[in-house]
Amino acid sequence: MAQPTTLQPPAASATHDAPRTGNWDGGNEPFKASYGKLMMWFFLLSDAFTFAAFLTTYGMIRHKHEVFTGEAKDFVFSTRWWPIPDHVFNAFPGMGHANVPLGFVALMTMILILSSVTMVLAVEAGHRMDKADVQKWLLWTILFGTTFLASQAWEWSHFIGGHVEGTVMADGTVFHGANLQMNQYGPVLFADLFFFITGFHGTHVFSGVCLLIWCFIATTNGTFQKRGHYEMIEKIGLYWHFVDLVWVFVFTFFYLV
Amino acid sequence: MSSPAAPEHALAPGEIAKPNTAWIWRVFGILVGITGVEFVFVFLMHPSTLRNSIFIVLTILKAFFIVGEFMHLKHETKGLIWTILVPVALLIWLLVALITEGSFIGEVLENMFK
């Protein structure tokens, strides 16, 4: 005898108007995650594709260029070879021309990791329905996020402005800094990749900060408290951690390797 | 490194549970530690394929902690974990293949017209 399945129309009864909750009626949640959270995961996966395209471009272009083979202390900027990162990124705000290799980018990395931590703390507070704590940690995350953006603005302006010594170009003139057509640090594509990759990441941070500010306003208005859960914080949190994750990769491939 | 456990006593209405944040700060410490190790290698080791490999391994280790703990993927269902990890693994394969094969073809074409 065939077993009755949920696909059959329900028998006319008092339960007729109740939503069907069988396995094939949408009553099943195989991943134990809500629709919104699942879709955020899939969006992040697609975003990972975008950044992978950037990394592929970077890898191939970098591979195509010569490597400086001498001692690191003898290194000079030249369009012949790819620059050594700690000779390009060696300035620190307020320290003039002091040589602080990778010092500022270390600080930026710390700020972004810290913002990730305060984001998890906000999500944790949301689980406990602790509105005041959610507000506190969201504010810290917004603060660290905007600090990171400001740091990146400084990094960009320094990169565009250039080092004092500059580099003698093919036509004999000394060029300082960088734009999309030429730069003092090395091959044209070095600066292009710097602008595109860190710029794309910075845009993501900016969107994240906007979403966090909206979250903070909604939390303050009690929207999530009335809704009975703080899942929106979790979804924005996923996005924020992804941005941190992308920075981890940008940091490795642009500043370390 | 477990996720926040359910409170042992039932909460009175309006009462807020105690925060459980030790695991978050532990992951933070690990991430800072790995970044510190990366900086040691930048300044104490000459650039080489080995050094680059060390950086990539450490980066993937950091990614593991960010995705597993902060994004909570480690504690999701097996189905969700594989749904995310399999495309990412294929993506990394694609990335490596494009860079190696692309560089090879680039060199061949460049030498062809010399």
Image (cartoon, rainbow, N blue to C red):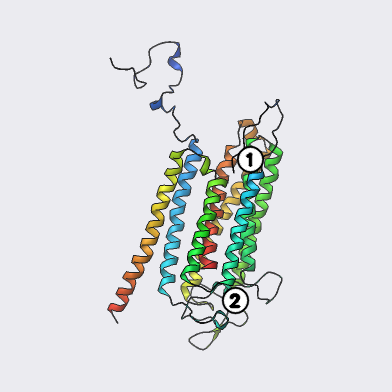
Q: Residue at x 38, y 16 (%)?
A: A10
Where does the image place residue B29, in percent across and percent down from the top left?
A: 64, 53
Where does the image place residue A141, in percent across and percent down from the top left?
A: 65, 50
From the image, tell me which residue sits under label 1: A124
Tell whether B35 sits left or right of A197: right
Q: Residue at x 54, y 87 (%)?
A: A173
The residue under label 2 is which amino acid type?
A: Gly
From the image, tell me which residue sits under label 2: A162
Q: Residue at x 38, y 57 (%)?
A: B93
Q: Hey, which quadrant is residue A109 in on the image?
A: bottom right
Binning the other alpha carbons within 10 Å of mark 2 as few (below 14), some (14 to 19) or many (20 upward) gives: some
Q: Hey, which quadrant is residue A106 in on the image?
A: bottom right
Q: Is residue A64 above or below residue A222?
A: below
| Tag 2 subunit | A
Which element type, helix, strand or loop, lies under badge 1? helix
- Report whether residue A6 is seen: yes
Where does the image place residue A46, in percent across and percent down from the top left?
A: 44, 50
Looking at the image, tell me whether mark 2 or mark 1 is earlier in sequence order.
1
Q: Is residue B53 above or below residue A10?
A: below
Which one is in front, B87 or B22? B22
- Report whether residue A218 is seen: no
Which one is in front, A152 or B68? B68
Same chain for labels 2 and 1? Say yes or no. yes
Report, in whole angstroms, how far the alpha carbon at label 2 lies from the one at label 1: 43 Å
The residue under label 1 is which amino acid type?
A: Glu
Disc 2 or disc 1, which is closer to the eye? 1
Where does the image place residue A139, in percent across and percent down from the top left?
A: 68, 48
Binning the other alpha carbons within 10 Å of mark 1 as few (below 14), some (14 to 19) or many (20 upward) gives: many
